[in-house]
Amino acid sequence: MSGTIATNIRLPEDLLKALKYRAIEEKKSVNQIIREAIEMSLAAVPQPKERKKDPFEDVIGIARSGIKDASSKHDRYLYGRKR
């Protein structure tokens, strides 16, 4: 696994309790149980072999780019021209 990024999720109390018990039973961390569940879920869905990259995907992580006017001039940054 490459670098990891922290994120937050909200779970119903009973689901979190069950998750913690599972982690104890399997001698794993809650994070590891969640990662494995997500990996299994994603592996079960067929992924397209090739797809055209959508320029909008470049928006991911834009908040760390240092661009101050991205919210008002996003088309320029995404498509290279005014829309």
Image (tube, grey):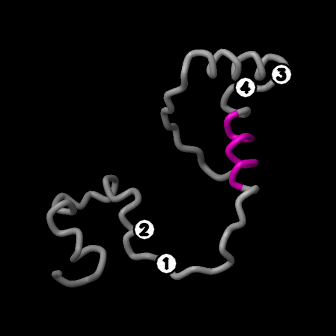
Distance (Cα) linking label 3 and label 2: 37 Å
* Residue 41 in magenta stretch: yes
Q: Are marks 2 and 4 in contact (CB under 8 Å)?
A: no
Mark closest to the chain's N terminus, 1 or 4: 4
Q: Residue furthest right?
A: 26
Which quarter of the figure has residue 22? top right
Query: Which residue is located at x 75 percent, y 56 percent?
Result: 44
Nearer-N-terminus badge (1/3): 3
Q: Is residue 60 left or right of residue 66?
A: right
Q: Helix, strand or loop at disc 1?
A: loop
Asked if labels 4 and 3 touch by Cβ distance under 8 angstroms, the answer is no
Give the quadrant of residue 45. bottom right
- Which residue in the structure is indicated by mark 3? 27
Q: Amino acid at mark 2?
A: Glu
- Magenta span: chief secondary structure: helix
Q: Which residue is mark 2?
A: 57
* Separation of residues labelled 3 and 4 (CA atoms): 7 Å
Callout 1 environment at 10 Å: few (<14), some (14 to 19), or many (20+)? few
Q: Residue at x 21, y 63 (%)?
A: 70
Look at the image and tell me in which quarter the C terminus lies: bottom left
Quarter of the figure with residue 46: bottom right
Q: Which residue is mark 1?
A: 53
Where is residue 80 drawn, in percent x and y? 26, 83
Q: Which range is magenta?
A: 34-42
* CA–CA distance in space, label 1 to label 2: 7 Å
Q: Which residue is mark 4?
A: 29
User: Is 83 contained in the magenta span?
Assistant: no
Find out whether the residues at labels 1 and 2 contact each other: C-beta distance under 8 Å: yes
Q: Amino acid at mark 1?
A: Lys
